[in-house]
Image (spheres, rainbow, N blue to C red):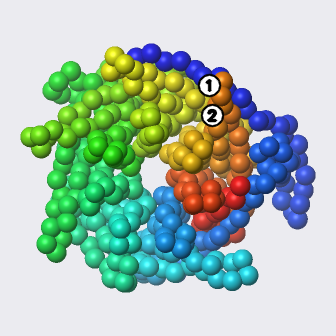
Amino acid sequence: MEMRNEGITKLRTSVLSITIKGFWLPLASLLLANAAWAATSYKVLHDFKNSPDGAAPWAGIILGPKSNPYGTTLGGGKGDKCSGKGCGTVFELAPGGQGKWRERIIHSFDNPVDDGPWGGLVADLQRNLYGTIVGNPSYLFEATHNGGWHQFTLPDGGSWATLSWNNGRLYGTGAAGCCGGIFRLTESGDGWAQEIIYTFHPHSGKDGTDGASPRGTPFVDGQGNLYGATEFGGNYPPKCSSGSGGCGVVFELTPTETGEWKEHILHFFAQSPNDGQLPMYGVVMDAQGSVYGTTLQGGKSQSGIIYKLTREKTGRWKETILYDFPNAGDGGAPSNLVFDKKGNLYGTASGGGGTCDCGLVFKLAPSKNRTWRYTVLHYFEGYDGGEPAAGLTLDSKGNLYGTTFWGGKYLYGVVFEITP
């Protein structure tokens, strides 16, 4: 498949430093170019305290009807069976007056054999919340809008990623078979029926070039086609830099009249300085049907890339690298992306940036001359959060919300807001 780089314009500044109230900060994190920072503010909405509060939010958040953030944490909570520190939570934040936010724990998990809610939440039209637990056994949980809590066992495993809601059904990535699969959940009676709609098989059958280990959230378009990425698999051999066969693929699954799903590989990632490797997160799509995503590694500096896949008239898909993370100062290991109404892309990078390599928040804006401008909106410095492992959520006003896995006042992670 053809690959090319679009031109990139970056807003960069020299990294000088000043000291404020005992914190050593890069001047770049305070005085970036006016175009990027003149009207941008960062605010911590909540500092997690561990128990009985939550701790270590790995997934992002969703916004409720009043734009209240909802999310999950891997640790903390009111449970006492996980070394007295809880096994994770489902939480809500709400304005508490005087610019402060108060937290409400919707549910504390209390099973030490569970692997915690790695994925975030998804809501249906009635404002019920859904997520999964990867454990023994794995299960789907539902928090109803009227305060109820229900759990449903998933015989074929839960999901490491956030579920997708589409047309009354839930879609997720799981551990089916040897190398993972895509499952669908349909409400049935007093529970949910799970079916595996596709199983990946990179080492047998067909031509041995299928993907393996789908990790990201499935994206379902208006026609019911499903798009995603697998962290491994693809052209096998050779091995990727991670030591596992293949560097990952981007795929499309199309439902057929027989009820089966047909797979089409849109792109094979290669162990090459001109391509990314290990697309750990899912993909998004623009109004023209082009697919966008990130890779954890790869590119010229092995720090990851942001890519775009466009369907050509021949039916093939062409990859365009929108941004190749050049070094630690510009971030590395980007997560999933989100579009705003103007076609700008926003995301987080869990590594690089700032004085502690704690990650950052970035914006990628398209220009008329087919270039994309990369701007850092915030450098994390530890005390305000560190390692944003998930992507961002946009509200109707363009404000950005997200989480960091650690850092903050108590070092257990934060929920943050960036206002343009």
Q: Where does label 1 land, which residue?
A: 370
Q: CA distance from mark 1 to mark 2?
A: 7 Å
Q: Answer with the quarter of the image where residue 44 lies.
A: bottom right
Amino acid on which disc 1 is placed? Arg
Helix, strand or loop under label 2:
strand
Q: Where does label 2 land, which residue?
A: 366
Helix, strand or loop under label 1:
loop
Disc assigned to residue 268:
none
- Residue 199 coordinates in the image, percent (x, y): 21, 40
Residue 74 visible? The answer is yes
Is the residue 17 above or below the residue 382 in the image? Answer: above
Is the residue 9 above or below the residue 77 in the image? Answer: above
Amino acid on which disc 2 is placed? Pro
Is the residue 371 above or below the residue 92 in the image? Answer: above
Q: How would you rate the neighbour count of disc 2 (Cα within 10 Å): few for under 14, some for 14-19, many for 20 or more?
A: some
- Residue 337 coordinates in the image, percent (x, y): 52, 45
Q: Quadrant of the N terminus?
A: top left
Residue at coordinates 54% horizontally, 57% vertically from top-left? 393
Q: In the image shown, does 86 or 48 lie closer to the viewer?
A: 48
- Residue 86 coordinates in the image, percent (x, y): 45, 75
Which residue is farthest left? 258
Image position of 331 (left or right of 209): right
Q: Are marks 1 and 2 in contact (CB under 8 Å)?
A: yes
Q: Quadrant of the C terminus?
A: bottom right
Q: In the image shown, does 387 or 186 lie closer to the viewer?
A: 186
